[in-house]
Image (spheres, rainbow, N blue to C red):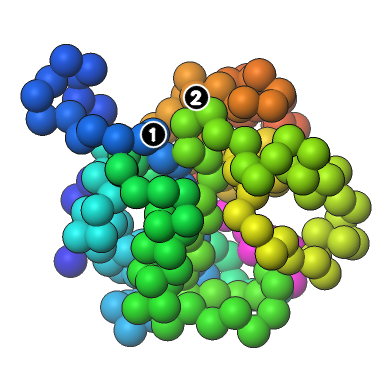
Amino acid sequence: MVFEKALQPTKPAHKDSPHMPVGQEILIALGANMDSPYGGPVETLSSALSRLPELGLAVRAVSKFYETPCFPAGAGPDYVNACAHLTAVPSPEAVLAALHQIEAEHDRKRDRRWGARSLDLDLLAIGGKVLPSLKYYQQWRDLSPEAQGRLAPEQLILPHPRLQDRGFVLVPLLDVAPDWCHPVSGQTVRQMHDALPAEARAEVKPI
């Protein structure tokens, strides 16, 4: 069954609502371009979204689903991408562990960096946290394209070092968190989105 919230962005509860989840603001990106045990990419993303609350990650808003060209070019079929706005009490490490558990349940293989995958859940940001340090974040943000494709960090880095560069992240993220402010650059999601080249935005197409 397709996760219903994936069809349209949902609105977060009012800040004074007694039903609003208590915890940290969490932004994640979802992507898939291969089948999983749950079906094709659309069904896989829907299944992953349904698992989040079961692992303590309350879903406040989900973007539309988008079709985007495979990155890097030629690495596999086109992707289905989305973003979600969550809240949760657990530590950043516990949030990441929950995302990895959901990936494993959907047959995610980590054979090579930037390879085709059945499910990718990227932790983009937790509120305004910068982890593990500003210096470490800046080192990974400033890696050359060649090094980005070859190296993988051994520590959790927040916010995601490539967040501001990727249309397939910023277009769906605009659906759910347009006013979130990057703790290092000071730019909102809307500003980062608008700064992308027009062709980078245009290639991310709603399904």
- Furthest toward the left, the residue is 18
Point 48% across, 38% down: residue: 126
Instruction: Let me know if residue 30 appears in the view.
Output: no
| Residue range of the region highlighted in magenta in the rendering | 68-74
State how far apart marks 1 and 2 are (Cα).
10 Å
User: On the image, numbered disc 1 is attached to which residue?
Assistant: 25
User: On the image, numbered disc 2 is attached to which residue?
Assistant: 180
- Furthest toward the top, the residue is 16
Q: Position of residue 60 (x, y in %)?
A: 27, 37
The amino acid type of the residue labelled 2 equals: Trp
Q: Position of residue 201 (x, y in %)?
A: 63, 37
Per the picture, the main secondary structure of the magenta-coloured stretch is loop
Instruction: Let me know if residue 180 appears in the view.
Output: yes
- Number of numbered tags placed on the structure image: 2
Say whether disc 1 or disc 2 marks the residue closer to the N-terminus. Answer: 1
- Check contact, mark 1 vs mark 2: CB within 8 A: yes
Instruction: Answer with the quarter of the image where residue 145 lies.
Output: bottom right
Point 64% across, 63% down: residue: 70
Q: Position of residue 58 (x, y in %)?
A: 24, 45
Q: Secondary structure at mark 1?
A: strand
Q: Secondary structure at mark 2?
A: loop
Indicate whether residue 70 is drawn in magenta. yes
Q: Nearer the viewer, mark 1 or mark 2?
A: 1
Q: Nearer the viewer, residue 132 or 171?
A: 132
